[in-house]
Amino acid sequence: MEGLPEFFKSKGYKKIPFKIAKTKHLIIKAKINGIGGRFILDTGASNSCVGFEEEFYFNLISSHSDTTAAGAGAVGMETRISYNNSLKLSNWTQRDFNIIVFDLQHVNLALENHQVERVHGILGADVLIESAAIVDYENKYLYLKDGKKA
């Protein structure tokens, strides 16, 4: 019988490794517009996002958004949105990727308080749902199916 990696590959999935921080956050490496960063893999986050301080780092062009963000003890936070970016996780790519830009200082402060390296952003359900994501916690792999935007 074939193993999970071979089975998922036969179904069009790409295998992306992640690590588990001592805070139990899933940490994954990603590239936005060709620039690498560390992200929390968060199935509970509705959208992928980066912090305001990362806007220039990832060469994002963002505009005002009327939507406010909430999460991890913060509500009503101002957001911006950046359209038409590229997202790459290992050998999986999504073009025409839209990302939310907002204040992630509270997230990084919490990580710092636990001696965990800061993150550039959060990879959320927008990507995970569209790519029919499967999280293999035991082997520490995220499987993403090539989507319509790949």
Image (cartoon, rainbow, N blue to C red):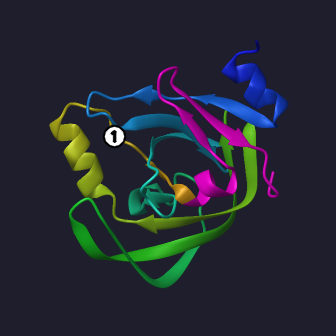
- The answer to whether residue 91 shows anywhere in this view is no
Q: Is residue 94 left or right of residue 40?
A: right
Residue nearest the observer in this picture, 113 or 56: 113
Q: Position of residue 29 (x, y in %)?
A: 54, 35
Instruction: Look at label 1 and name its amino acid.
Output: Arg
Q: Residue furthest front?
A: 1
Residue at the outermost left position: 113
Q: Eyeballing the image, is 134 above or below 5?
A: below
Residue 49: x percent and y percent? 48, 59
For this view, does 15 lie left or right of residue 24?
Answer: right
Nearest to the observer: residue 67 or residue 64: 67
Q: Going 51% across and 63% down the picture, which residue do you hit? A: 47
User: Going 68% across and 29% down the picture, which residue do you hit?
Assistant: 15
- Magenta span contains residue 105: no
Q: Residue at x 74, y 45 (%)?
A: 93
86 displayed left or right of 24: right
Badge 1 crowding class, 10 Å Cα cut-off, few under 14, some 14 to 19, many 20 or more, is some
Location of the N terminus (image quadrant): top right
What is the x, y in percent for residue 63? 55, 79
| Residue found 49% across the figure and 82% down from its top | 65
Q: Give the residue at mark 1.
A: 118
Is 143 placed above or below 59 here?
A: above
Task: Compare residues 1 and 37 and report the one nearer the observer.
Answer: 1
Vertical order, 23 against 129 (above or below): above
**For numbered disc 1, what is the local secondary structure?**
loop
The part of the chain drawn in magenta is: 126-150
Say which of 78 and 122 sits in front: 122
